[in-house]
Amino acid sequence: MAHAVVIGAGIGGLTAAAALQRRGWDVTVLERAPALEPVGSGLAVAANALRALDTIGVGDPVRALSAVRGELGLRRPDGRWLVRTTEEATSARYDGDSVVLLRRAELVEALHTALKPGTVRLGTTVVAATPEGEVRTEAETLRADLVVAADGVSSPVRAALFPGHPAPRYAGVTAWRVLVSGVETGPASETWGAGRVFGIMPLAGGLTYCYATDTVPAGGGGGDQRAELLRLFGRWHSPIPELLAAAAPGDVLRNDVHHLTAPLPAMHRGRIALLGDAAHPMTPNLGQGACQAIEDAVVLAHVADTSGDLADYTSARLARTARITARSASLCRATRLRAPLAVRLRDTAVSLAWRFAPGRATAAMDDVLAWRPPQG
């Protein structure tokens, strides 16, 4: 039986493990954390990722957690809509799927449940991995037919495989995330201001996932982050102030956003395949970070089970993920605009494009959301 070692038990690593096990592989997942306590609050699983999850039997359990109904769109800080559509319109375009917003913990649990007991080894730090398939931990050396490096934005494996490639760079924005309960939110929305963004996403169970970004120098933080959010967004439209007032200060997460500005020359070397943020860290503006990791995972499992040539994995994934990474970065730059005239021009362009050509605006996401996993 072929053996795979997966480095990292995040969304991409767990998906890869489940996809490989369903194809008969023996899989070991190495995770340095002592428990599967998910980093982050919520995430989006779009139509393309839902189809990928269908291949490992997790798609429908995730769909069952969807709480997005009715209106959604893009707003100004005063509450006026720039873009207004419905979940039903989006799902009709993509065979009944739009986007499921859920707690990261719920997706981690669904993926972990799909694995055989004992697959994940917690509290295990990987010291090194070689293209020949050798993985060294602090306690032992494992040998594998396939090594899946799903070790995140700051991937040590990526740095070792491509030492001359530029590391991920600060995207110019810091992000906050928090889960809030007990506040009536209304429709899902994202609000763009001058250099700032605030998102409101209803989740199942009466929770709301809030996220925000601001154009600030890297390396900030410390202190009461809820108070900082209230300072930045407390005068924006309702229910933003109410959500922030109800948030527990200790639950607010703050992270600088980093992305890869130049695609890697390949997503593999020897027996090692890079996946998700280890291969193509991107800004969160398209909501595709986790989705592309899930796509990577099921394509990698397909390649491993068919041709076995990881060059086919690079061929299938590198150009697509590079396009999506660049497109997300472009949106990020648009949200960073601060000059009043530039902000007015941006908002007017977005509003007019949607008002006079909504079909074209929706179709612009077809190349991302209409993706389908390989068959067989």
Image (spheres, grey):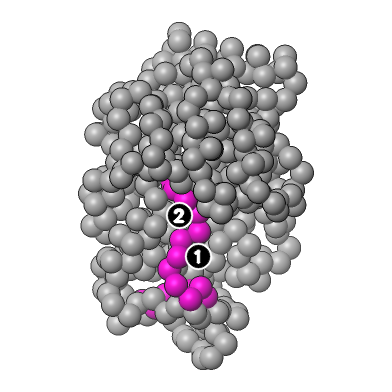
Kind of residue indicated by mark 1: Ala
- In depth, the one of 11 and 281 nearer the eye is 11
Segment tinted magenta in the rendering: 27-43
Query: Residues at badges 1 and 2 in contact (C-beta under 8 Å)?
Result: yes
Q: Which residue lies at the image location 69% right of the left edge and 51% below the top edge?
A: 223
- Residue designated by label 1: 150
Dominant secondary structure (helix, strand or loop) of the stretch shown in magenta: loop
SS class, disc 2: helix
- In depth, the one of 359 and 238 nearer the eye is 238
Can residue 328 be seen from the camera position used here? no
Screen quadrant of the C terminus? bottom left
Which image quadrant is residue 277 in?
Answer: bottom right
Which image quadrant is residue 367 in?
Answer: top left
**Residue 8 placement (x, y as % from top left):** 49, 69
The extreme bottom residue here reads: 140
- Residue designated by label 2: 293
Q: Which residue lies at the image location 39% right of the left edge and 65% below the top edge?
A: 14
**Residue 246 placement (x, y as % from top left):** 49, 40
Please tell me which of labels 1 and 2 falls first in the chain.
Answer: 1
- In depth, the one of 360 and 73 nearer the eye is 73
